Image (cartoon, rainbow, N blue to C red):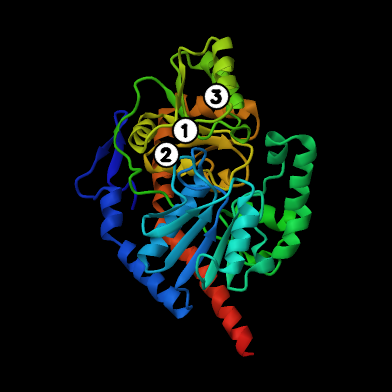
Amino acid sequence: MAGAGFRYEGGEFVEQSEFMERSEFMEQSDRGSIVASMTELARSASLERVSMLAWRDLEDPEAGGSEVHAARVAELWASAGIDVTMRTSFAAGKPQVAWRDGYRVIRKAGRYMVFPRASFSEMMGWHGGRDGLVEIWNGMPFFSPVWARTPNVTWFHHVHADMWNMTLPPRIAGIGRALESSIAPKFYRRTPIITLSDSSKSELVHELGFKDRMVHVVPPGVDTKFSAGGEKSIRPLVVAVGRLVPVKRFDLLVEVLIALKERQPDLEAVIAGEGYERDALEAQIKSAGADGWISLLGRVNDDALISLYRRAWVLASVSAREGWGMTITEAAACGTPAVATNIAGHSDAVKDGASGLLGKSREDLVDALDRVISDEGLRVRLSEGALENASRLTWESTAYGTLEVLANEATRRKSAQKD
């Protein structure tokens, strides 16, 4: 299991020789068998060619967890012999058509024109036929149930709700909310919906009116390169990772950190990520006189990110909305617990009291961070729980679970046609 090869001792994770590292374990265990099972599952459901529709590409500068999720599933499906085409929007400096990790990527049209253009090109079969379709509904839908004649499923990571007001003018935000909450769901009532967590499923059922039996929970994975090891920072270090956009509420995090500094004078904090709120955050940090101990690193590569996760005493995530919170499980796989807002998605990614702590208010978050930093016994226990929690999450399981929903839909349609 992930993390089984380390024990926490003297402020660092010490490798135990009788166990394999997490990445080595996964490489030698069931990856091959799951890929083989996907090959057989796709064959039995006649899913040789599958299209994916996404509004943003993995190589877009603003790509986030949703794009990582789609790319990892596409890669694993391709390794199972499925012909996968990802249809998405332009990414600056990238070719319109390319191959990546075994699957084809078509980047045509802008962020908003991609919806009608991709839908029309798929409907007309301009990029070849398909046996199945996966739509990624990320705020704006492609309305695939209206025009897709092949078996199709929809990924719906989370309800956007108040996110509309955070990013758009009031009138346009109102249109977005109405589209998501009351207009579009009517067209998806008979389409299998896949979401990341039980708490997000509850929102889809109770807020948007989807039928419980039509919503399937398939948690995301965590890459094996995220693993425990090395020393923790000498001083208490809080790390946060994400796009610098309103929904992530980094302005709130800065307020929390400043309040925490009064209790933890040696505190240091690092925020990794890029976005259009960077200037405002820099100004907020500077005006509070916190620029000597809160660092904005910008976007970092994976090696630097893993190093940050391993050195951190705790990861903080104060988002207003999340489908899961992939940075939480990435940090967990590196042996770092999380303090996060108690929202749908987070409440599944963090096992409250076991792999991290959840809080609702600003004061809750300050108290939770203070507890983790002050209590070494609690911190060790949460670190071990974080490792155990992350060990259950693999992209192979995510890819298989998603394919299983699509294959079941394909089989159901075949049976209905025979009847």
| Total tally of numbered discs in the picture | 3
SS type, badge 1: strand
Residues at marks 2 and 3 touching, judged by CB atoms closer than 8 Å: no
Spatial separation of the CA atoms under disc 3 and disc 1 = 20 Å
- Residue 33 against residue 11 in the figure, above or below: below
Looking at the image, tell me whether mark 2 or mark 1 is earlier in sequence order: 1
Spatial separation of the CA atoms under disc 2 and disc 3 = 23 Å
Residue located at (66% from left, 68% from top) = 147
The residue tagged 2 is: 331
Looking at the image, tell me whether mark 3 or mark 1 is earlier in sequence order: 3
Please state which of residues 159 and 52 is positioned toward the viewer in this rendering. Answer: 52
The residue tagged 3 is: 278
The residue tagged 1 is: 315
- Residue 261 against residue 152 in the figure, above or below: above
Q: Mark number for residue 396?
A: none
- Residue 334 against residue 52 in the figure, above or below: above
Residue 283, percent from left and from top: 57, 15
Amino acid bearing label 3: Arg
Q: Nearer the viewer, mark 3 or mark 1?
A: 3
Spatial separation of the CA atoms under disc 2 and disc 1 = 7 Å
Amino acid bearing label 2: Ala
Mark 3, residues whose alpha carbon is within 10 Å: few (<14), some, or many (≥20)? some
Residue 327, percent from left and from top: 47, 40
Residue located at (72% from left, 51% from top) = 180
Asked whether residue 213 appears in the rendered view, the answer is no
Residues at marks 2 and 1 touching, judged by CB atoms closer than 8 Å: yes
- Residue 215 against residue 157 in the figure, above or below: below
Mark 2, residues whose alpha carbon is within 10 Å: few (<14), some, or many (≥20)? many
Residue lying at the far left of the rendered structure: 17
